Amino acid sequence: MLQAFITGLLATSSLIIGGILAIRYSLSNRAIGVIMGFGAGTLISAISYELIFEAVKLGRGTMYPAFGFFAGASIFYFSDKLIANFGTNNPMKLGASKNSNLIIPMVLAIILDGVPESIIIGLGIFEGVSGNLTMLVAVFISNLPEAIAGSSGMKSSGWSNKKIILLWICIALLCALATLAGFSVFSSASQEWLSFIQAFAGGAILMMLANSMIPEAYEHGGKLAGVFTVLGFFLSVCLVVFENFH
């Protein structure tokens, strides 16, 4: 059980690393846009191959993957919209970067994505899946640019360094606990419900990408963001191919 917790913590430690990098270095909007583009590419690949494709295989012709996919997308959409409505009375302070608009949806997506993904990692440890290391690398890479972009937005909105790091530590611990749950609790769940969990994560991430991350990446990074999106997708696909052939 300790191994499952530590493994989950390692997978999401990139959130803390990304926060530290954003605090120590003042990144330009263009650099943040390019980083977000790269992260979007890795996430698109993860949605397609690590989450939805695997969910469909586990679902074995049932509607569980479809229900999970639309549940994840809907919960993210309405949660993001509800939080945005509450925030209308608290406009950004003068001079704050537009990246601060990404804080809530990005953190929300990381949680909605990270918890189910961490459960899947825990299940991989329980079942002794050989490609689990590749999954850890994919999660680590995709979380890093999100944390950098989110932390930059927090800085521009006046968040203290301590508060930023504390937030990422809490999310990393939450995901580590989810990995532990996947190892000890969800190992007895049916394959249909496991397919629901994976598809749920895929729907939540895709909604976040379409509504927040990709538009902001292009706005700040320009056409170069598209280049790095392709590179991020390619790298993530290479990890999937390596996992399937080793």
Image: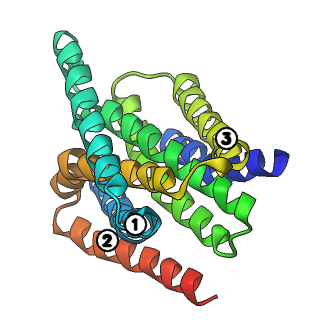
Residue 43 in percent (x, y) is at: 38, 61
Which class describes the residues within 10 Å of circle 1: few (<14), some (14-19), or many (20+)?
Answer: many
Residue 152 visible somewhere in the drawing? no
Q: Going 58% across and 90% down the picture, which residue do you hit?
A: 245
Residue hosting label 1: 42
Label 3 sits on residue? 181
| 216, above or below 96, in the image | below
Query: What amino acid is labelled 1 in the image?
Result: Thr
91 or 169: nearer the viewer: 169
- Of labels 3 and 2, the one closer to you: 3
Please indicate whether residue 2 sits to the left or right of residue 151 in the image.
right
Picture coordinates of residue 234 (x, y %)?
A: 38, 80
Q: Label 1 near label 3: C-beta < 8 Å?
A: no
From the viewer's perspective, tell me whether residue 97 is left or right of residue 159: left
Horizontal and vertical percent position of residue 162: 58, 24
User: Residue at the spot x=42%, y=50% of the render?
Assistant: 196
Report whether 69 appears left or right of 165: left
